Image (tube, rainbow, N blue to C red):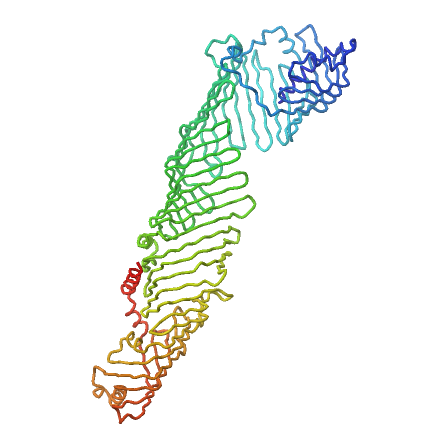
Amino acid sequence: MLKKLVVTLVVALLVVLVVSAATLTRHSAIEITQWLLPPDWTLHQLTDLSLGWRGGSLRRLAAAVPQGELVAEEVQWQWQVRMNFQQPVTLVSLSSRRAEWLSSQGSASKVPRGDKTTEAGIRLDDFRQSSWWPAVASSSVTIEELQLGMADEQLLVRMAQPVTFERGAVAAQIGDISVDLDWSWQSQNEWAGSVALTGPQSAQLRWRLSALENAFAVTGDLSVPDLSVSSSRIEVGVFPFTGTPTGTPLLTAQAGARLPLPEPLSDRHVAVEMMAVVSEMGGGSATVTASRLESAFTEERLAAHLEVKWDGALGEADITLPHGEVYLRDIDLGESRINEFRTAVTGSLDPASGILSAETTETQIVLTGADWAADVRSSGLSVTASAEQQSISGSLQIESQVASRSFPGIDVVASASAMGDTVRAELTGFAPWGSLGELRAHYIEGQPPRFEAHVDSALWDWPSLQSTLSTSIPELADIEIASLSLSLDASGEWREQGVFANLSGQAREGYFSTAGLGVAGLKVAPFGMRVAGNEVAPVAPIEFSLDAVNTGVTLADLNGTLGKDDQGWLLIHADGRALGGELVIDQFRDFSSDGPLGTVYLNNIDLAAVVDIAGTEGVNIQGRATAALPLVWQNGMVLIDAGTLRGTPGFLQYQPSVDPAAIDQRVSAVAAALSNLRFEQLNANITLDQSGMLFLQTSVLGNNPDYENGRQVKLNLTLENNLLSLLKSLQTIESVNLWVTRKFEQQH
């Protein structure tokens, strides 16, 4: 940019020499100046021009060239030429209140490869042999202050004193970045100097320039304290003049540096070597090689080889990474750690489109946290990046461990993209037992991340799931799932307080069993739920149905409605069939705290079915009854508190296997009364305590035609049995699993 400004001003100064004759003609200065300008130059404005032997000034200059426009105000200059070239000569002294360069967006046109004008390349005649060179070499230039406007930035250039060919110092500032350049003559054809950069990044280059017969050699040491680059050696050879032997490049450069890796790898350094060659036609190539990694772990490795090739017009360039390899370990991430990271990568960059493409092979990342670990592997990842968008896609294999429990490996097909302040990701997971579903995430900077997920277990291999997970989660060994088709959709966002989401789904074909519980034909109607942090609540009551439930006692055709209130989950209502009668449950609480659960009602049940379950020998009963069983949850057990049973008229026959008379006279009398009892009333109070003992305080009123001439008798009996032992005998895992299996096979 500064070069264009200087060239433009020099041309303007030459034009001024012609303009001085404008006063002798009938044409204006600006008209005469326009005659002498190149065809693609346009002079829009030239005002208040003055010209003398020692200098001149102008108020305003506005010119347009193919590369942009220049506007200068309040420009003053002076020059002085002396015939004795051994003395310093003030050739140009320039000051400007304001100058602005507006660059055009057009790019330079390509030069055809076959054009004869390119045969000499871009080499120059040796200007040191020109007659005007001594004047230039012995001149001095002063810029008191030059301001150049570039888009939203301002370039400010100052000189503390006039600069000469032998020595000088120039300071420039753009925004918060300052550049200081100084040089001085050291010996015959040799100069030394430095360039210092200060601002958000600081750097300093100490250089030495040697002018050879037909070339220039530059060596230097670069220091970048902010990057911990204490010293980097730079060597450049420039062969700019015509007459250079054929095959000699226009420029050669090589550099070496010891660079730190970024956080969290700042304790590691990599040695980088760079070599570049530019031909006389402008084409060339460069290589950057990283071959040595300095680390506390000797087995770590970082190796890469970058190749760059371009043509003379810079219209075509190839940038490739034929091979890159990384192996790192023990990287501290704060709350987690990368124990191991390894990958190999190849890639390329298309400068015309600005698109970077990369492929990885055999990538592995081992991560650990406070109570978890993950081993992530990939056989290949693809990365594409440009200034507008970046994306990555590929497959991953993940094995994890949480709280000393190892989980089976899963496969994930993943893709992610970023455009501006928006990031999107899609994941599809697969486990040994089937598809884990899909997850889509969407993040906009400054907003909570949003997500959508879908899970469907219709095609899961449930036996495989149980056998695979039971080794990691022993509790699952007690669950036998024959079938369960669960469909679940979720959408929401992650906030600082937790996950906030809406869930919808349904379930069908549920056949499973646990220790002592079998479920057949579970169905859950389409439902909706809201998740807010740790709170989960249904949008509306959830309806479900069961073909049958077996806990030792079989419940059939169970239909119910679940809901939630301020106290927790609630079985609002359920009804079904049990013991040959009807089962009804209303307002049944969950098991989250000790206290009353609710009351179970058994209407018109068959007493014979009750006796069959109890396995009481020698008892034959006919009749029906209604029971109300208030249930209480206490210390992890279900208790019955003051339950009641009321029977309808029926008959009872009791034939003990042992002669009651041999036991006790009273027992014999009771047995005789019950041998053929027609009862009119049958009442019982029911209690189940924490030991599992079921107590029935029974009152029976009736008559036995075979006992004491059929007179009416009333018996008060207290019966007890260990209900837990009875149920366990009825609900062994094997029998319940077999029951579920048969139910499943009947439906399929």
Q: Quadrant of the N terminus?
A: top right
Q: Residue at x 54, y 29 (%)?
A: 224
Quick one: 685 or 73, which is closer to the camera? 685
Q: Give above or below for 288 relative to 710.
A: above
In the foreground, 113 or 342: 113
Which residue is found at the position 39% from the left and 49% from the top? 436
What residue do we see at 37% from left, 76% from top?
688
Give the side of residue 54 with respect to residue 569, left or right.
right
- Where residue 679 appears, as percent x and y from the top left, is 32, 86
> What is the x, y in percent for residue 62?
71, 21
The one of 402 and 37 positioned closer to us in this rendering: 37
Q: Position of residue 597 (x, y in %)?
A: 44, 71
- Residue 20 left/right relative to 366: right
- Vertical position of residue 504 compared to residue 254: above or below: below
Query: Considering only vertical position in the picture, is 740 above or below 239?
Result: below
Quarter of the C terminus within the rendering: bottom left
Labels in figure, total:
0
